[in-house]
Image (cartoon, helix red, strand yellow):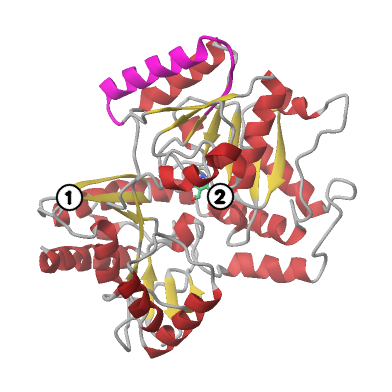
Amino acid sequence: MSFSEIPPPPEHDPGNDLPELRVRPPGPQSRTWLTRHGRASAPMGPRPAASIARIKADVPDGSIVLSTGLGSNLIDVDGNRYVDLAQGFGAQLIGHRHGSIQRVLELQAGRLWQALGDVYPSDAKIGLLERLTALYPGRAQALLGQSGADAVSAALKTAALHTGRPGVIAFRGSYHGLSYGPLAACGLRESYRSPFAAQLNPAVSFVPFPTDADQAARALQLCAEHLVDGTVGAILVEPIEGRGGVLIPPDTFLTELKGLAVAHGALLIADEIWTGLGRSGSWLRMNELGAVPHLVCLGKGLGGGLPISACFGAAEVMQAWSQPEEVVHTSTFAGTPLACATALALLDVLKRQDLPARSHALGARWLPELRAAVGTSPLVAEVRGQGLMIGIELSPRLAGGAVTLQRALLERGYITSTGGGARDVLILTPALNVHEPLLAAFTSALAGTLRLLG
Ligand SMILES: Cc1ncc(COP(=O)(O)O)c(C=O)c1O
């Protein structure tokens, strides 16, 4: 069966139209909005040279302002229609404004918007806790939060409570969110950590993330050296480094890492915030590889577009929260009924349409198509991926790296994201229910764009 013959998902998914640009992006409306954004929003990213800063303030470039979305389509304020292959940094697992999510959102909006934390929880929250813990083999318990960083903070705290040890092993290139707990373990860009370094957990050791067997052996050896003095309570790992540039370790690395954690009394925390819920082709990548971690973090797509995250794991580990004095990890909106309801709807759609399996099959067919189309371009170093989590690493010959390519693709009507320490990887995370003709059209647009840039 060829790539274009993969059957569509069983339910009708609107919002799978090809790009249609009315004006070259950014159009006049986007420019006006972006100027206002530049004045009202705190600046993010490296400070441009003074002369460029002046120009940028007047004529924002390379960006657009979005107004509506449906499925795999986004529309900007100038009426341009795009195909969204970023999907909110991988967070819209079933596309924008999915009908099932919207229906449940409306139903829940007519019932209850806010409960009272764990004092008087909502029925939706309890339903979600049960569904999440069922993803874990054996008896499990869960904690809900609002962001991925929140879930990772919960996991790090759980490990500290359970083991009584402050140390954490994290990996270079990893990203776990930017609040203080996860920031201490952020291996992606030193500039994210360094201004706050004095305020972060000093007991974090970084180990290089391996992408081949030799590197894996070395990484395991380094982990073992850090574990030997018994101060490390947690090993925090992404099964595939997402923002790091879709870096995939050898399969056995994660099982061996689990073995090391167990042997030294530390907990293995799997940050599946990007890889999980079908994105990388299975419900949970660690379980698929037989490396069931002590704790799992989910976020991004969990709420079907609403912010919610979770940390769950073996009940005997989560029991660490039961302390002689009151110790809690909570927040006003943790487990908010609206997001719990949409998360339940999201899990239903994933299961009903078997989207993790579709992600696996579609990714396995799209990857060779992409390699055939662009793998020999002098601007491309490697095309890699798992499921519908794909990275195209660019060679240093492309000035501006993935950002240059991202901007050129925007002008053809495709929305993508970038990653890698030097932003040298174009990242593709389409909806798991995306229609194949959109991927095929993107593949040829990508090839054409690279030919022009080269
Ligand atoms: C693997 C991983 N963990 C954690 C996070 C942080 O999630 P959030 O931005 O919701 O805090 C991200 C965000 O990109 C991520 O990719």
Between circles 2 and 1, the one closer to the viewer is 1
Q: Is mark 2 within 8 Å of ligand 1?
A: no
Q: Nearer the viewer, residue 418 or 342?
A: 418
Residue at (82, 27) in percent of width and height: 322
Q: Is residue 280 visible?
A: no
Residue in the foreground of this view, choosing between 206 and 274: 206
Instruction: Determine the main secondary structure of the stretch shown in magenta.
Output: helix
> Residue at left 35%, top 63%?
416
Question: Which disc is residue 276 wearing?
Answer: none
Is 215 a magenta residue?
A: yes
Secondary structure under badge 1? loop
The percent position of residue 305, horizontal first and vertical second, equals 58, 62
Q: Residue at x 47, y 47 (%)?
A: 192
Q: Quadrant of the C terminus?
A: bottom left
Asked if residue 332 is among those painted magenta in the image, a careful observer would answer no
The quarter of the displayed image where residue 401 is located: bottom left
Using a 10 Å C-alpha cutoff, classify the residue at mark 1 as few (fewer than 14 neighbours), some (14 to 19) or many (20 or more). some
Residue sitting at x 44%, y 60%: 431
Helix, strand or loop at disc 2? helix
Q: Position of residue 12 (x, y in %)?
A: 48, 69
- The answer to whether the beta carbon of the residue marked 1 is less than 8 Å from any atom of ligand 1 is no
Number of disc labels: 2
Residue kind at label 2, given as amino acid type: Lys
Side of 44 relative to 119 (left or right)? left
Name the residue carrying label 2.
351
Q: Which residue is mark 1?
A: 395
Q: Is residue 163 left or right of residue 291?
A: right
Image: 335 above or below 142 = below
Instruction: Indicate left or right for 43 with 249 as reference.
Output: right
Q: Magenta residues, as a range?
A: 211-235
